[in-house]
């Protein structure tokens, strides 16, 4: 989600066009994981779905494909730039089964209930994920789906240890944590769902792993570091000189290739459950 819900936290990645483009590239890299999660959870043709924290619209578009022309997807985000960007993308693609609204859906009322509520990398930015799910559940019909995919950054590592990759992951962890984000929320989704009053969720975990010069993790991690750099410098975590922005991706690649090693991305952990009829 593009804006935090607490004055004590801030969205460290900002809302620039560069960041919105990065979100789409990242979304493409992890699209198969999210697609499989939604299919397994039961998102299908004809459903009306709310995408919480839609950002640049990639999850909204993925869901739109699953629900088809007879379905509808509403993408909601508090950041106007994100909503305008996603809306322009939808218009350029000629999509008629999606719309985007500028709001925090946890605090908004909708005219009719949804069949499902979904979100990717969004609860991690709420100050109280349990409270957020409780509020969001108001918008889903009885027996409707609640599906979220969050990260476990502790999963990200290299073997053998590749210094540039390990330093980059450490900078990302420190910066996001200092900004108020929950960097291991994926592992907490089971108790979060229970505390929100949902039945214990089904869960799955996916991650990118690879070695060699073509592994996509180098670009994903280096872009994330570069877009976090202003926050890193503000928080005195790392400077541009320490990061070595112009060569970071190549250094990561060269080290891993020289070591004949592998790198592992953050874990993408999905959880899904259904709202009880009595709620």
Image (spheres, rainbow, N blue to C red):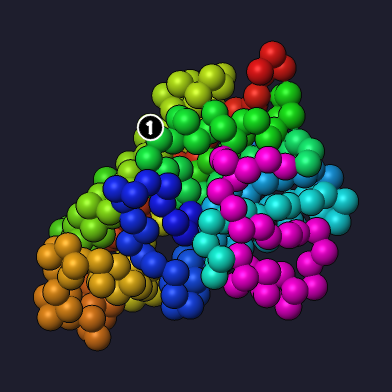
Membership of 154 in magenta stretch: no
Pick the residue in front: 7 or 214: 7
Q: Does residue 256 show up?
A: no
Using the image, determine if residue 22 lies above or below residue 65: below
Which residue corresponds to mark 1? 188
Membership of 96 in magenta stretch: yes
The kind of secondary structure element at disc 1 is helix
- Residue 42: x and y in percent read 70, 37
Q: Residue at x 36, y 65 (%)?
A: 13
Q: Does residue 11 show up?
A: yes
Pick the residue in front: 27 or 97: 97
Residue 150's image quarter? top left
- Residue 179: x and y in percent read 28, 53
Residue 171's image quarter? bottom left
Using the image, determine if residue 193 lies above or below residue 266: above
Q: Which residue is drawn at 41% across and 51% down?
A: 4
Q: What stretch is highlighted in magenta?
A: 83-110
Q: Is residue 124 left or right of residue 234?
A: right
Pick the residue in front: 188 or 4: 4
């Amino acid at each position: 989600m593009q804006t935090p819900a607490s004055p004590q936290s801030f969205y460290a990645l900002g809302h620039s066009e560069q960041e919105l483009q990065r979100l789409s590239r990242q979304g493409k890299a992890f699209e198969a994981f999210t697609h499989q999660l939604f299919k397994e959870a039961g998102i299908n043709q004809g459903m009306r779905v709310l995408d919480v924290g839609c950002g640049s619209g990639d999850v909204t578009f993925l869901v739109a494909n699953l629900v088809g022309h007879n379905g509808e997807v509403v993408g909601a985000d508090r950041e106007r730039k994100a909503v305008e960007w996603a809306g322009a993308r939808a218009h350029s693609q000629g999509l008629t089964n999606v719309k985007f609204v500028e709001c925090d859906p946890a605090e908004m009322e909708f005219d009719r209930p949804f069949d499902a509520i979904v979100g990717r990398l969004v609860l991690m930015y709420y100050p109280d994920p349990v409270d957020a799910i409780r509020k969001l559940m108001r918008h889903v019909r009885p027996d409707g789906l609640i599906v979220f995919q969050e990260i476990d950054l502790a999963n990200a590592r290299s073997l053998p240890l590749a210094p540039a990759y390990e330093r980059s992951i450490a900078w990302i962890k420190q910066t996001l944590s200092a900004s108020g984000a929950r960097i291991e929320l994926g592992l907490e989704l089971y108790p979060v769902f229970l505390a929100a009053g949902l039945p214990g969720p089904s869960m799955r975990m996916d991650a990118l792993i690879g070695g060699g010069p073509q592994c996509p993790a180098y670009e994903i991690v280096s872009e994330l570091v570069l877009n976090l750099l202003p926050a890193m410098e503000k928080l005195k975590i790392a400077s541009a000189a320490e990061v070595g922005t112009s060569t970071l991706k190549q250094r990561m690649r060269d080290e891993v290739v020289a070591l004949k090693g592998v790198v592992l991305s953050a874990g993408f952990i999905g959880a899904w459950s259904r709202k009880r009829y009595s709620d």
